[in-house]
Image (spheres, coloured by chain):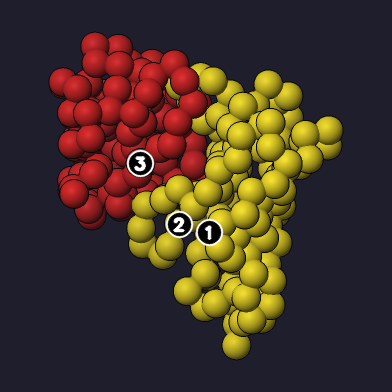
Amino acid sequence: NAGVTQTPKFQVLKTGQSMTLQCAQDMNHNSMYWYRQDPGMGLRLIYYSASEGTTDKGEVPNGYNVSRLNKREFSLRLESAAPSQTSVYFCASSPRGGETGELFFGEGSRLTVL
Amino acid sequence: GEDVEQSLFLSVREGDSSVINCTYTDSSSTYLYWYKQEPGAGLQLLTYIFSNMDMKQDQRLTVLLNKKDKHLSLRIADTQTGDSAIYFCADHRGSYIPTFGRGTSLIVHP
């Protein structure tokens, strides 16, 4: 069982470069999420997608864009990376939109912006 | 203030019980979850409790919910070094978006 797969696992960027973090889930879940995790800050929601075809901003969306490509895939794009975006990024999915439910997380993508 | 609050660190001796506390503010919370994050990994659901329950026990884990005080706790009996991790309390309110606490780092020493 693959669950939630994120790529790449590690990335180093220079300020101003762009990149896309990929996320795919094989559990037929409706909802998908992107979080960032910083020391002492816990998890902060960047964007989420309640269902295929919809995306909404979370707590910290500035500097990011997302695409819900299909039900399986939800990508996060940094158009012009900044050192403040150095973080660990987690993708998650949930089986039910509109109701509570467990989140399933990927293993994380560790991004360093120099 | 934060919607879900946790202390940042807890240190216990191997074999002792650990108690991780969490407070939340939304009285409409329906599900409350505990997630565990091991070093270098993503979060995994450890256990959860429905808001109409006071207690849930699952092997070494006991979850207590005090709805009046909006207080949730996770007790780990006979704590082992493998329990060293970050534990997140999360509050689901029937929306798409759970609210996470900042996480409590549990350090287990011999």
In this figure, which residue is indicated by the disc labeled 3? A104
- Judge from the rendering whether residue A72 lies leftward or rightward of residue B68; answer left or right: left
Disc 1 + disc 3, Cβ < 8 Å: no
**CA gap, disc 2 to disc 1?**
5 Å
Disc 2 + disc 1, Cβ < 8 Å: yes
Which residue is the extreme one toward the bottom? Answer: B110
Viewer-closest of B108 and A108: B108
- Judge from the rendering whether residue B42 lies leftward or rightward of residue B101; answer left or right: left
Residue A41 seen from this side: no
Please give the label number shown on residue B37. 2
Kindly indicate whether the residues beneath marks 2 and 1 are on one polypeptide chain: yes
Badge 1 density bin: few <14, some 14–19, many ≥20, Cα 10 Å: many
Is disc 3 placed on a helix, strand or loop? strand
Chain A takes which shade in the image? red
Badge 3 density bin: few <14, some 14–19, many ≥20, Cα 10 Å: many
Residue positioned 18% across, 28% down in the render: A72
Is disc 1 placed on a helix, strand or loop? strand
The chain that appears yellow in the image is: B
Which percent across, then down, holds residue A108?
Answer: 31, 49
Q: In this view, does A82 lie above or below A54?
A: below
Please name the amino acid that badge 2 sits on.
Gln
Viewer-closest of A114 and A20: A20
Residue positioned 47% across, 74% down in the render: B82
Which percent across, then down, holds residue B53?
Answer: 69, 37
